[in-house]
């Protein structure tokens, strides 16, 4: 009986994995074969959710898949986020962390203030605003997916927020490399900081850095942008518990409210993976078995997160998204502009007062 209850999740998990495989295939065809990049600048996760939305709305999925899709969104997602920590190496960030960390903090605070004002002005759902704000300021879809469970966001809210962040992330990915080169007069450090702070997704930052490298022959910019983005990703550790506290405190009337009840404990696993990576690097260095283990964990993280995206897409009803209206897209656009403008002002202030 117990075994049968567990087996019911398998069809949905398999379906999510099949969509991951299709997404990876499409990604390679579009990014590598057609566009000619060595590594595709397109997010596999973005393709997965689009395929999921397509299949989920065009075809009537059998009820037997739903429990597995729910399991994928709830548990496989969290496992993917935990494994994501293996790619972060904070000890390498000290070289320019003194500039990057205050810059990231100022951008996060600014966006949160602006979106807080927009919630009242545009009267959009608080959960939607929180998802868009953390997606804009930390690490795009990964941050949205990690935050959604702790603020009890619906499947449609998650899909809408991801579509929002993806749209404006791609727009900034394509425009910012050229804008930054003109504005910062080809200064690699400043351009790398700007790209790493103002663009939503890690893959989009890498793509923007790659575009800049290929257009303006500056590999240093790509490295700075990527490392800045990884520093920004570590703020997930702080922002998820913070959003959980802010949202749940605002929703409950209980006097005995406790953060322990809503604390996302998978963040502990995420931190554990960061510690494991850094301790392992100190002990094993460039040992081939250690490097292979890191790469395998990174691969599993990508697979699990993309499966979760596919599951979200398959469970998304486009009619419900349509009913949410256009206002959240206004918030996403303003969030993108806020991050970019605040980033420029902060970099300019740094140049004026500290150099």
Image (cartoon, rainbow, N blue to C red):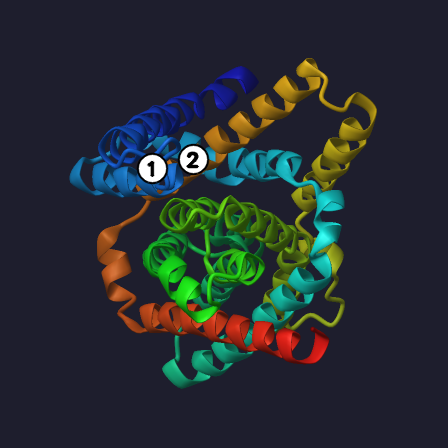
Residue at 41%, 85% in the rendered image: 121
In the displayed structure, does residue 260 sit left or right of residue 52?
Answer: right
Say whether disc 2 or disc 1 marks the residue closer to the N-terminus: 1
176 up-or-down from 277: above or below: below
How crowded pointer 1 is (Cα within 10 Å; few <14, some 14-19, many 20+) is rated as many
The tag on residue 306 is 2
Which secondary structure lies at badge 2? helix
Q: Nearer the viewer, residue 85 or 260?
A: 85
In terms of depth relative to the viewer, which is nearer, 38 or 113? 38
Instruction: Using the image, determine if residue 159 lies above or below residue 129.
Output: above
Looking at the rendering, which quadrant does residue 326 occupy?
Answer: bottom left
Q: Which quarter of the picture shows residue 241?
A: bottom right
Decide if residue 17 is on the left or right side of residue 148.
left
Q: Is residue 173 left or right of residue 114?
A: left
Query: Spatial distance from mark 2 to mark 1, Cα to Cα?
Result: 6 Å
Residue occupying the point 48% across, 48% down: 218
Residue plotted at (73% across, 62% down): 98
Which residue is identified by label 1? 48
- Which secondary structure lies at badge 1? helix
Label 2 environment density (alpha carbons within 10 Å; few <14, some 14–19, many ≥20): many
Q: Where is residue 315 shown, x and y percent of the image?
A: 33, 43
Which quadrant: the C terminus? bottom right
Q: Which mark is residue 146?
A: none
State whether residue 331 appears in this view.
yes
* Circles 2 and 1 in contact, beta carbons < 8 Å: yes
Residue 72 vs 352, above or below: the answer is: above
Residue 124: % across, % down: 39, 74
Q: Position of residue 299 (x, y in %)?
A: 52, 26
**Residue 64 seen in the figure:** no
């Amino acid at each position: 009986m117990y075994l049968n209850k567990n087996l019911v999740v398998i069809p949905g998990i398999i379906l999510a994995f099949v969509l991951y495989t299709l997404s990876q295939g499409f990604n390679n065809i579009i990014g590598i074969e057609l566009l000619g990049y060595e590594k595709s600048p397109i997010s596999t996760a973005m393709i997965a959710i689009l395929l999921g939305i397509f299949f989920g709305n065009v075809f009537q999925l059998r009820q037997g898949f739903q429990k597995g899709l729910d399991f994928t969104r709830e548990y496989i997602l969290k496992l993917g986020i935990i494994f994501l920590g293996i790619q972060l190496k904070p000890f390498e960030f000290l070289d320019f962390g003194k500039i990057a960390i205050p810059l990231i903090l100022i951008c996060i605070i600014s966006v949160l203030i602006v979106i807080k004002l927009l919630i009242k002005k545009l009267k959009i759902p608080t959960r939607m605003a929180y998802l868009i704000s953390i997606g804009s300021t930390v690490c795009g879809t990964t941050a949205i997916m990690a935050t959604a469970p702790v603020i009890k966001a619906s499947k449609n809210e998650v899909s809408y927020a991801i579509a929002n962040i993806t749209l404006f992330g791609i727009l900034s990915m394509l425009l910012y490399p050229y804008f930054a080169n003109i504005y910062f007069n080809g200064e690699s450090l400043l351009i790398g900081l700007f790209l790493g702070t103002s663009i939503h997704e890690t893959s989009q930052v890498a793509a923007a850095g790659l575009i800049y490298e290929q257009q303006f022959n500056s590999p240093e910019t790509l490295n700075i942008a990527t490392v800045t983005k990884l520093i920004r990703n570590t703020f997930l550790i702080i922002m998820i518990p913070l959003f959980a506290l802010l949202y749940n405190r605002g929703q409950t009337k209980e006097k005995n409210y406790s953060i322990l009840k809503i604390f996302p404990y998978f963040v502990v696993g995420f931190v554990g993976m960061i510690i494991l990576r850094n301790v392992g690097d100190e002990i094993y260095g460039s040992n081939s078995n250690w490097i292979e283990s890191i790469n395998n964990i990174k691969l599993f993280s990508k697979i699990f997160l993309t499966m979760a995206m596919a599951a979200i897409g398959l469970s998304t009803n486009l009619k419900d998204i349509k009913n949410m209206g256009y206002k959240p897209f206004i918030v996403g656009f303003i969030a993108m502009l806020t991050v970019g403008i605040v980033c420029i002002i902060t970099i300019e202030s740094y140049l004026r007062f500290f150099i």
